[in-house]
Image (tube, rainbow, N blue to C red):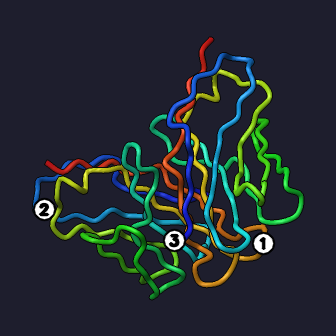
Amino acid sequence: AQSVTQPDIHITVSEGASLELRCNYSYGATPYLFWYVQSPGQGLQLLLKYFSGDTLVQGIKGFEAEFKRSQSSFNLRKPSVHWSDAAEYFCAVGAGSGGSNYKLTFGKGTLLTVNP
Amino acid sequence: NAGVTQTPKFQVLKTGQSMTLQCAQDMNHEYMSWYRQDPGMGLRLIHYSVGAGITDQGEVPNGYNVSRSTTEDFPLRLLSAAPSQTSVYFCASSSGQGSSGANVLTFGAGSRLTVL
């Protein structure tokens, strides 16, 4: 069964500082990987996704993530954090194909606080 | 387009009462799903559907029923509510078609349910 681990429950950074949120996954084949963001009281918005090809993927709001197969990781990065980035971030993994292609498994989330 | 619409946004129930959370999408997506979100647990899949007339269980299906009579609608039924079902519920849909669209979920805004 697929699984996702987000080791950091809560991260605090200063505005303008760089950010890296960690995500490790477990899946037997090539995974589909996602990062979603949830602002307080809101639904989830897709930041970026990895299906294949270039292992460094760019997303919205200046975020990027790098797929490292050897480390089973898909860490999210941003070079300079803005106060509006304060939110909860979820990493998710899905099967690459077949009947279970539609079922995403989410990590437990990382809450990001941004200090002025 | 409205995207994924969930109703109601808030609901308070007493133990043993029944209710239905409504979910509708206007994107002609084949795949629809229900997740629940609990603090520190991330999102967990309750039930999902890969098309009209086809439903299946996710990770935490007990206490919930679903049906999919049309492509647009995917209601979630609680037959006898329990305090353990206090949660925020999210409906999501996906076209599930092709590598560019597969598994990219569009989420509703959520329904917050409290069972007393």
Category of crowding for the residue at label 3, using alpha-carbon neighbours closer than 10 angstroms: few (below 14), some (14–19), many (at least 20) = many
Q: Which residue is label 2 attached to?
A: B17
The quarter in which the N terminus of chain B is drawn is: bottom right
Image point (54%, 39%), residue name: A110
Tell me which corner region of the image, top left, top right, bottom left or bottom right, holds residue B61. Answer: bottom left
Task: Say which of marks 3 and 1 sits in front.
Answer: 1
Task: Determine the residue positioned at 77% across, 24% down.
Answer: A80
Give the SS element for disc 2: loop
* Image side of residue A53 versus residue B12, left or right: right
**Residue type for callout 2:** Gln
Q: Residue furthest top?
A: A116
Same-chain status of marks 3 and 1? yes
How far apart are labels 3 and 1 at the CA level? 18 Å
Say whether disc 2 or disc 1 marks the residue closer to the N-terminus: 2
Question: Which chain is disc 3 placed on?
Answer: B
Query: Residue B5: x and y, percent?
Result: 48, 57
Numbered tag placed on residue A67 in the rendering: none
Q: Quadrant of residue A19?
A: top right
